[in-house]
Amino acid sequence: MQNLENKKIAIVCDWIKDWWWAELVLEQMLEIFPNADIFTSIFFQENNPVFKWRNIKTSFIQKIPLLNKSHKLALVLRPLAFESFDLSEYDLVISSTSAESKWVISKPDTVQICYCHTPTRYFWSHYHEYLKMMEFWALNILWKWLMPRIVHSLRKWDFLAAQRPDYFIANSKNTASRIKKYYDRESRVIYPCVDTSSYMLNENKSDFYLYVGRCIPYKKFDLIVDTFNKNGKKLILVTNTYNKLYRELKEKSNLNIEWKLNISKSETIELFWKARAFLFPPEEDFWLVPIEAMACGTPVIAYGKWWALETVVADKTGIFFGQQTVESMNNAIEKFENMSFDFAEIRKYSLKFDKNIFREELLWFIECI
């Protein structure tokens, strides 16, 4: 697709509510296409400089109290919301999605690309897990009764919507395999990125282990707390999620475990810089935090599955543990403490995930269409 500077471009994403790793991908897309319009179900990042002067078009969900604050509650409305967007004036539409933004409908001669972070987890790969951890408060009982009765139709509609993009890009090999399995679509792998220039190499590590993430069930904060309650080693846990799980785990944490809530990005980077090792216990389709740690020369102790296998090099940038159990994780920590790592080589390895590489690969892919 040549002469992109003359094309009318739209970037579509599921929601813009928090600032996590999918939003970093969106930021890089906006760097490539600064004049692109943004379409999303809801938008609550008004003070974020990334969106200054951007033309942002939200759906009708934005105006519905309660639903506009919870993307989970708005689940059954989002397909309708994205199908309601008029994209007829656009030459190129790029959806950055792990949910429903690929449902948009474009005109026949519009090129539509889906950058897929994962096929919709709560319909497919993690349906049963999400069913157990729904956060609908007083409506939990209703949703747990309703969801099994409608999910079959939602899966059919999601499959059909996945046939609308002309091209799929996957954020990992694991995601590419899921796209094939659930949507029967081929995809090109382009890894997401971090700004590695924002991180500095440090070869003088401290004695603490580090974990950073949302304190929700599948992130496995409970496994880490149990592990370090048993081994007694110094641990720092960083999250911006204040919920029931956070309160329960903090209450059961021994004195060797320190919790940090809602700290700044600069403070988090300093912890990456100093940590003895970064912990990576969940099953993730993609997660850029271990890359940030490695950009500081910090090795990673990871659960050996999915995204970790594409980002951690065994015995060079970190090590793996085979089961999500206290025993398996502690065995890996013990092994780690008897090893040595080349921190400069870890930093060098992280550069393959730099933002400039992402931009070059994505732009090359689009120009070759």
Image: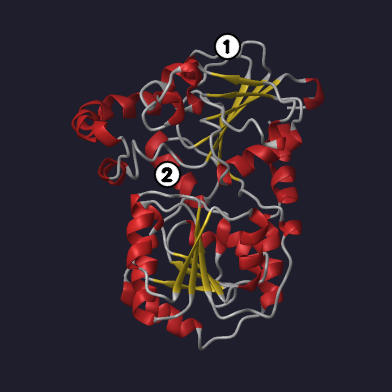
Q: Residue 114 in the image: state x and y as whole percent.
A: 56, 32
The answer to whether residue 8 is above or below residue 365 is above
- The amino acid sitting under disc 1 is Asp
Q: Is residue 223 left or right of residue 108?
A: left
Label 2: state its secondary structure: helix
Q: Is residue 42 left or right of residue 137?
A: right
- Give the distance between the C-alpha atoms of the residues marked 2 and 1, in whole angstroms: 29 Å
The answer to whether residue 24 is above or below residue 62 is below
Q: Residue 178 has which mark?
A: 2
Badge count:
2
Q: Residue 69 in the image: state x and y as whole percent.
A: 45, 29
Depth check: give the residue in front, 216 or 4.
216
The answer to whether residue 179 is above or below residue 257 is above
Q: Is residue 203 left or right of residue 319?
A: right
* Earlier sequence position, callout 2 versus callout 1: 1
* Quarter of the view holding residue 267: bottom right
> At 38% across and 62% down in the image, what residue appears?
250
Residue ID for mark 1: 86
Q: Residue 322 in the image: state x and y as whole percent.
A: 37, 71
